[in-house]
Image: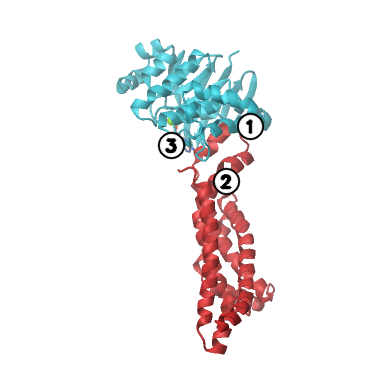
Amino acid sequence: MSFISMQHIEKSFKGNVVLKDVSLEVNKGEVISIIGPSGSGKSTFLRCLGQLETIDKGTIMVDGLCLVKTGADGKAVYADKKTQRALQIRMGMVFQQFNLFPHMTVLENILIAPKMVKGMKEADILPIAERLLKKVGLWDKRDEYPSRLSGGQKQRVAIARALAMNPDIMLFDEPTSALDPELTGEVLRTIQQLAEENMTMIIVTHEMAFAKQVADKVLFMADGLIQEEGRPEEVFDHPQSPRTQAFLQSML
Amino acid sequence: MEYLAQIVPVMAEGLKVTVSLFCVVLVLSIPGGMILAMIRMSKLRVLARIVAIYVYIMRGTPLMLQLLFIYYGLPFIPYIGIQFDDATAAIVAFVMNYAAYLCEVFRGGIQSIPKGQYEGAKVLGFTYFQTMRKIIIPQVIKCVLPPLANETINLLKDTSLVYVLAMNDILRIMRGIVQRDFDTSAFFVAGVFYLLMTFVLTRVFSYLEKRYAVYDE
Ligand SMILES: Nc1ncnc2c1ncn2[C@@H]1O[C@H](COP(=O)(O)OP(=O)(O)OP(=O)(O)O)[C@@H](O)[C@H]1O
Ligand SMILES: [Mg+2]
């Protein structure tokens, strides 16, 4: 069975149906890219997995644990709070707007969650934080506040912060969309590096070249449905659905 | 000079009244304002609406009117009428009024925190309580400090309204002295007392603001 299994997810906001019937299977170490036009439900789908939205219908299993399944009455039934939180901690999420904590330094941003959530001792987290900040190239910025960093630096801190919880899965929601074009590279390289280390990742992105290069599987989403999915060469070079073809045309 | 030495200790007695009233009201209206803000922003629709109306009334009518009503008017209300002594009436009126103002201060502060901060904390596994304590409240404090300083200094000056009751605060004692001696020195002594107190408050708040100013945004 696959590592992440999302089956027949349905979700609407006050009558506005955003996810109609979306399913996705992800194996351990796999990198999935989700592309698609604005408003197609990509973020919503990712946020359902990250437990920032609740689904109306469908099943989500992660590593054999059930987060939510459709009950007898056809409505989604969530697992108990303990299971929800256990799964939450195993997933890291990176947002378009970084969402760093502005009142904490870079280092404090990294330390706080392992300390508060996992109850780790500072002495045990420090070496991890150092390794992660060095990895994203920001160890010498550790005592700066986020407001003093560039967008690309902020996003790399956000990635390091998520990694400090040692997640099994990383979710990215347009991690480079808020960045100046010349700063996207440094963030994409960091994500690329994670891919090489076999991190399981789902990446919503508008960077087609990057999606093609980093993903094992690409999903094209429109109107709350997955219109096409497959290996990047297939989807990008030989798109089957006219919707995909039109979208890729428009992205050129 | 001799005259000053004579009136200052008398007026200092009034200072005690002013300072005690100020402290009691501040200590009660800060948590009061927080609770009102939480209700106002909660999903308890009806209660939230009631708090909104309450705040509107408290901010839309003069504090003097509220003070007079609670002291002189309340005893005449059928069934619920109660007669407070002057200190209690003053405390009740001030706390009710300032809690309403502070409700808006805290509400503004909490609403200024972007949703992303809650989401950022949630995906890291923070509980609601941890999120509030470590992420939201420290940021709220920073952004409510300037308006809180304003309200605090207003409160200090507003306490002088109790002279319409029979409370011997600085202002009432001052008036007594001026009417007795036909001498204006007491005005200046009272002014200096207030200035000293606002000076202390300003320093306290600028210290706090500096402590929280290490980051911007
Ligand atoms: N919290 C919400 N409340 C109401 N409607 C929402 C909410 N979040 C998203 N929507 C709606 O759901 C639809 C899909 O939004 P979503 O953010 O998932 O799209 P997206 O594919 O991520 O788009 P983009 O590329 O612009 O980020 C949109 O029509 C949006 O208005
Ligand atoms: Mg989106």
The label number, if any, that marks residue B174 in the structure image: none
Secondary structure at badge 1 equals: helix
Categorize mark 1 by other alpha carbons within 10 Å: few (<14), some (14-19), many (20+). Answer: some
Categorize mark 3 by other alpha carbons within 10 Å: few (<14), some (14-19), many (20+). Answer: some
What colour has chain A? cyan
Please state the chain letter of the residue tagged with numbered disc 3 in the rendered image.
Answer: A
Front residue (pair B151, A138): A138
Q: Quadrant of ligand 1?
A: top left
Secondary structure at badge 3 equals: helix
Q: Which residue is mark 3?
A: A148
The label number, if any, that marks residue B137 in the structure image: 2
Front residue (pair B106, B134): B134
- Residue A222: give x, y in percent of width and height: 41, 25
- Residue B76: give x, y in percent of width and height: 65, 79
Please state the chain letter of the residue tagged with numbered disc 2 in the rendered image.
Answer: B
- Residue A233: give x, y in percent of width and height: 39, 10
Q: Is label 1 on the same chain as label 2?
A: no
x 58%, y 16%: residue: A3
Q: Which residue is mark 1?
A: A115
Secondary structure at badge 2 equals: helix
x 56%, y 14%: residue: A28
What colour has chain B? red
The C terminus of chain B sits in image quarter:
top left
